């Protein structure tokens, strides 16, 4: 059994496993080399050979315990025929939603558009580098995808709640997203994903909004995510949830019941450890990797010591930043692997 699955299923607390969100990305010179020749991000995600190569790049450098498939949560709206493009130094930009078109999309057509992702997973799962390691597939949570699809760009901590007042957009579209997320998850598992992570990047936006009502959190975040979690569990694969920025992680866990909860860097890990009895993942601020080795060791040991007697997967409270030096990632891996 892999170190991560051993941690999740057997509550193993020694030899903390480690993988990092965005571990296959812009901080690696070998990735930048590929990216320079492949300027269209969507096309790169749909290049089964290159995406598999990118997925495995971190495992060639570091003793990580998992690979996460090189893809993006916005491949779902792309497959639902919403225009998606990634603009340098700005981020994703989405086109207008064609409601009539989305309603007519068939499963076979959706799967065909994302077929290279599943083929990439299959290729990656058969590589010897993945031996006794996990291959993580992932999706965006229904709420976060709804935000992107309606807002047509990253909300950057600002959410126009008026855009969600339309009943079709806020209710029916959410159900459509959920339906196709389940298809996408199942196909990733069939192709070799051994764990699924659900990224709810904008979970914290609702509670911060001036017109927030508690029922909104249940309607948009808790209930749709719970249905996805149950779906993954029924496929006998562990599921990790990352509701970034949410105020009450315990409440989320009690309702949604994931196998693993990934915490963000604004959470006090000691407080979380005492309240949550499932496997915990993450927490370290990615900016710590931009400091020095002494600071990195101090902060990493804080998390390792905090979760010494608790099932814990070392990770960050968000993705690896592009300006991170690979040597600092190597140092972090060494700290975790040498910890006892």
Image: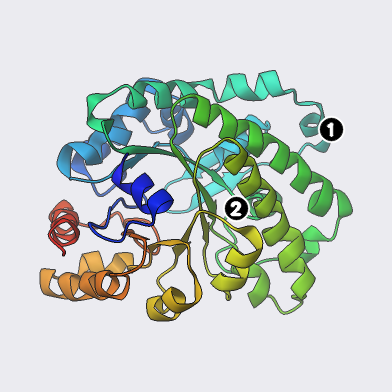
SS class, disc 1: helix
For this rendering, which residue is in front, 285 or 315? 315
For the point 53% across and 47% down, the residue is 92
Residue 198 drawn above or below residue 302 = above
Q: Whole-percent x and y of residue 87?
A: 47, 45
| Res. 32 image quadrant | top left
For the point 55% across and 64% down, the residue is 156
Label at residue 47: none
Rendered image coloring scheme: rainbow
SS class, disc 2: loop
| Res. 155 image quadrant | bottom right
* Residue highlighted by disc 1: 100
Q: Earlier in the sequence, mark 1 or mark 2?
A: 1
Q: In the orientation shown, which residue stands out farthest toward the right?
A: 167
Q: In the orientation shown, which residue stands out farthest toward the front?
A: 10
How many numbered badges does the structure rendering display? 2
For the point 70% across and 23% down, the residue is 107
Q: Are marks 1 and 2 in contact (CB under 8 Å)?
A: no
Asked if residue 305 can be seen in this view, the reply is: yes
Label at residue 153: 2
Residue 331 drawn above or below residue 302 = above
Q: Is 249 placed left or right of 225 in the picture? A: left
């Amino acid at each position: 059994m892999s170190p991560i699955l051993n941690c999740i299923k057997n509550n193993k607390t020694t030899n903390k496993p480690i993988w990092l969100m965005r571990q296959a990305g812009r901080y690696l010179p070998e990735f930048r080399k590929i990216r320079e020749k492949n300027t269209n991000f969507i096309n790169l995600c749909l290049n089964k050979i290159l995406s598999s190569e990118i997925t495995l790049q971190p495992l060639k450098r570091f003793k990580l315990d998992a690979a996460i498939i090189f893809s993006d949560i916005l491949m779902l709206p792309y497959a639902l025929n919403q225009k998606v493009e990634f603009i340098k130094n700005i981020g994703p930009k989405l086109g207008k939603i064609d409601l009539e078109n989305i309603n007519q999309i068939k499963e076979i057509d959706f799967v065909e558009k994302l077929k290279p992702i599943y083929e990439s997973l299959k290729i990656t799962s058969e590589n010897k580098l993945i031996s006794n390691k996990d291959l993580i597939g992932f999706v965006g949570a229904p709420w976060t995808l709804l935000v992107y699809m309606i807002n047509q760009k990253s909300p950057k901590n600002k959410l126009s709640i008026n855009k969600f007042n339309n009943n079709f957009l806020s209710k029916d579209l959410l159900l459509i997203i959920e339906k196709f997320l389940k298809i996408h998850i199942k196909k990733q598992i069939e192709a070799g994903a051994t764990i699924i992570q659900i990224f709810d990047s904008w979970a914290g936006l609702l509670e911060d909004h001036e017109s927030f009502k508690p029922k909104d959190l249940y309607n948009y975040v808790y209930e749709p995510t719970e249905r996805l979690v149950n779906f993954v569990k029924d496929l006998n694969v562990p599921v990790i949830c990352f509701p970034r920025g949410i105020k009450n992680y315990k409440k989320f866990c009690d309702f949604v019941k994931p196998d693993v909860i990934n915490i963000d860097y604004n959470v006090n890990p000691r407080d979380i450890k005492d309240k949550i009895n499932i496997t915990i993942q993450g927490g370290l601020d990615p900016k710590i990797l931009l400091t020095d080795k002494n600071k990195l060791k101090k902060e990493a040991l804080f998390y390792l010591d905090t979760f010494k007697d608790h099932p814990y997967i070392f990770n960050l409270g968000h993705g690896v930043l592009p300006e991170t030096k690979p040597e600092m990632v190597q140092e972090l891996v060494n700290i975790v692997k040498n910890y006892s």
